[in-house]
Image (spheres, rainbow, N blue to C red):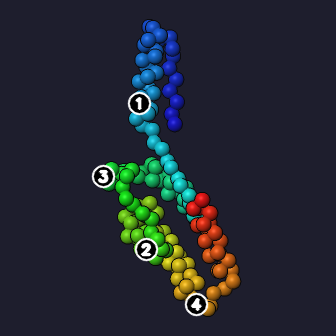
Amino acid sequence: MRSTTVATDKFQSRDELVSFIEQQTQSAVEKAARVEVRSVSPDANPYMVLHAIFKTGIAGGIAPIANLRQAERYLSDNIYTAIENFRNAEWTSQLLGDDVKARYADLKQGSADRCPRLLGTIVKGCEVQFHHEVYNQLLWGQF
C-alpha cells in the first residue's frame, strides 16, 4: 500500500486539514477490499491456495449473481461432482492456466478413483486411516 506524506503547514486551518483527512479516508474505504478465507482442505497445496487467493483478489471480478450474499450456492456433496465443476469452471482456467488445471484435475480424479468404496476389498490400511481422518475432520467441523 502506498503511503502519502502531507505537510500539515499547507493547510490554512484545522478544518481544512480535517476535511483533507476525511476525503483521504473516504477514498481509502472505497478502494478497500476484504479477503475471507474459510476452511481450506488439510491436503490442499498451500502454494496453490495462496496463489488462488491473491490472484482472485487482484484480478478477480464480482460474480454476476443478483443478491450475491444471499445467493443459494452449495459446495458439491461428492468428489466426482466437485472435479467436474472444477473442470468446467472458466475461472479456474484463468487462474491456473489450462495445462496446470488439467494436470491438477487428473491427479484429483486418480485420487477419487482410489476411494475404498470403488476398490472393494483391495483397500490398503493407510487408505482406510486417511479416510477415517477425513471423516473425523468432517464430524469435528459440525460442532
Name the secondary structure under disc 2.
helix
Count residues near mark 3 (Cα–Cα under 10 Å), then give few for <14, some for 14-19, many for 20+.
few
- Which mark identifies residue 27? 1
**Dot placed on the residue nearer the N-terminal end, 2 or 3:** 3
Q: Residues within 10 Å of mark 1 (few under 14, many from 20)?
A: few
Residue at (50% x, 49% y) in the render: 36
Q: Secondary structure at mark 4?
A: loop
Mark 1 or 2 closer to N-term? 1
Name the residue located 37 percent from the left edge and 52 percent from the top edge. Answer: 70
Question: Which of disc 4 and disc 1 is earlier in sequence?
Answer: 1
Residue 22 sits in quarter: top left
From the image, tell me which residue sits under label 2: 81
Describe residue 125's horizontal placement relative to residue 45 as left or right: right
Amino acid type, label 3: Ala
Badge 4 or badge 2: first in the primary sequence: 2
The Cα atoms of the two marked residues, 4 and 2, are separated by: 21 Å
- Residues at circles 3 and 1 in contact by the CB criterion of under 8 Å: no
